[in-house]
Amino acid sequence: MSQMPQQAAPAKCPSCAEPLESGDLFCGACGYDLSAVPAAPPDHPTLTMGAPGVGPSGVQWPPPEPEGSGTPAAPHLPTDLAGTDSGGKPLPGSTPAHGSPDSPSPHGSPAHGSPVSPASGVRFDRPPEPEDYPLQAPDPRVAASASSAESAENSETAELPKVCVACRAGRVDDDGYCENCGHAQPRERDHMEQEAGPVAAVSDRGLRHHRNEDAFAVGHTALPDGTPASVAVVCDGVSSATRPDEASMAASRAAIESLLAALEQGTHPQQAMHDAIVAASQAVNALTEEPPSAREHAPHQNAPACTIVGSVVAADLLVVGWVGDSRVYWVPVDRSAPSARLTEDDSWAAQMVAAGLMSEAEAYADERAHAITGWLGADAYELEPHTASFKPDRAGVVVVCTDGLWNYAETAEEMSEVVPADAAQRPLHAARVLVGHALDGGGHDNVTVALLPFPEPPQGAGSA
């Protein structure tokens, strides 16, 4: 069996620089394996003579360990200093390693300074791990969103500028028009929807009017004995009057507040409806109380005015009240039973029919048909609230609407046909369908409708 040729042992240990004797296989100081030391290459010195301890590139070498200190001198690796080219310039990407004077020593390296552990062969010359790793830079989109949210919280009164819905670029001025393209912006009342317990209502500006002069109010409460009660009020502003949109809004709010308060106190629903119409009339009349300067430029304008219609569903009782030409329809769940119109218009056409001068078809075909003879307002002839109560003998839905809807479904039979079959279970959806029916028919007027489901009455109730 052949043997590997033995190499001459070096004069000093390559690891700890301890003097060696000829024939040593291991260093007596650190136990370094001397058999793994390759033969020394031929000596070809290329260093230029200069100042002591200074290399040709002007780099200060580490000072030697003091003699007799008892501590072995730490070896210096080629990676301890930055390399240079023949002109003395640093090589690209060459930086001092961890053992250079400008870099800290690695943690956990052997005491003798060797980059390799003699026992395990693990290197200790890797760069030290940082104590704290830097966090990833935040997403600028998230940062901007958080900054905006914080700004909104810090400034409760700050409002973001409105952007035009048409050009998506211009700012909307206080008058509701885009400063860039001049497009009129949709207003809050152009389309409104609301649910209140089992009651729902929808109002839309329509396709011909420049603003929505209708208004509604819906609510629900309980009678003193705990019986639930549903309420809906619909108002239609008189276009020929001043500020009709304000009149309808004031009337609907005053009426719903009066109704809910009276029902909770135990007032009979029919009396509560009468009182609510009176309260609505007073609210509209109050709109005329304005400073004299407000009429300087329009002294001959009519006082604010509107119509009103409302309904209350409580226990087995159905109550309606109205002034003007807005209507209430009764549509049973069982469509084989007859539907009915529960109100009579305060209009020219209705008077002609009541006097026997015209048939209903002839009267409503006349151009004067929709001229109203009753309304809420300071210039009304006399306030005469109409109220009526019914006791339906079956489940159904109550339709409270302005003429913007019933112009496209005038008779009770026509209204029954356009009301969805599941209106009692989905009143908001049914109200949307009815408004869509009016818009599909032309949408010549503002359209407002409220739906109140009427539950199955107890046995022995009267008929509508």
Image (cartoon, rainbow, N blue to C red):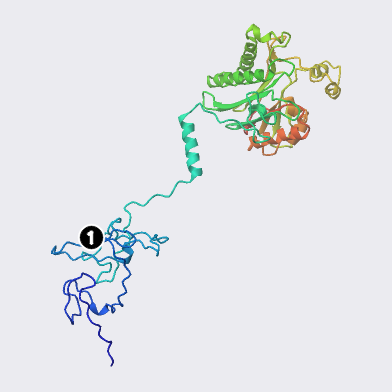
Image location (x, y in percent) of residue 458: 61, 32
Residue 138 shown left or right of residue 340 in the figure: left
Tell me which corner region of the image, top left, top right, bottom left or bottom right, holds residue 388. Answer: top right
Residue 46 shown left or right of residue 419 in the figure: left
Image location (x, y in percent) of residue 247: 66, 17
* Residue 210 in sight here: yes
Residue 138 shown left or right of residue 246 in the figure: left
Q: In the depicted view, which residue is nearer to us: 97 or 310?
A: 97
Please give the name of the residue rendered at 51% of the width and 23% of the height, measured from the top-left corner: 224
The crowding category of the residue bearing disc 1, from other C-alpha atoms within 10 Å (few below 14, some 14 to 19, many at least 20), is few
Q: In the depicted view, which residue is nearer to us: 362 or 142?
A: 142
Image location (x, y in percent) of residue 102: 30, 55
Q: In the depicted view, which residue is nearer to us: 358 or 98?
A: 98
Per the image, the residue denoted by label 1 is 63
Q: Quadrant of the C terminus?
A: top right
Q: How many numbered marks are there? A: 1
| Residue found at the far top of this picture | 292
Q: Quadrant of the N terminus?
A: bottom left
Tell me which corner region of the image, top left, top right, bottom left or bottom right, holds residue 98. Answer: bottom left
Residue type marked 1: Pro
* Residue 399 in sight here: no
| Above or below 287: residue 164 | below
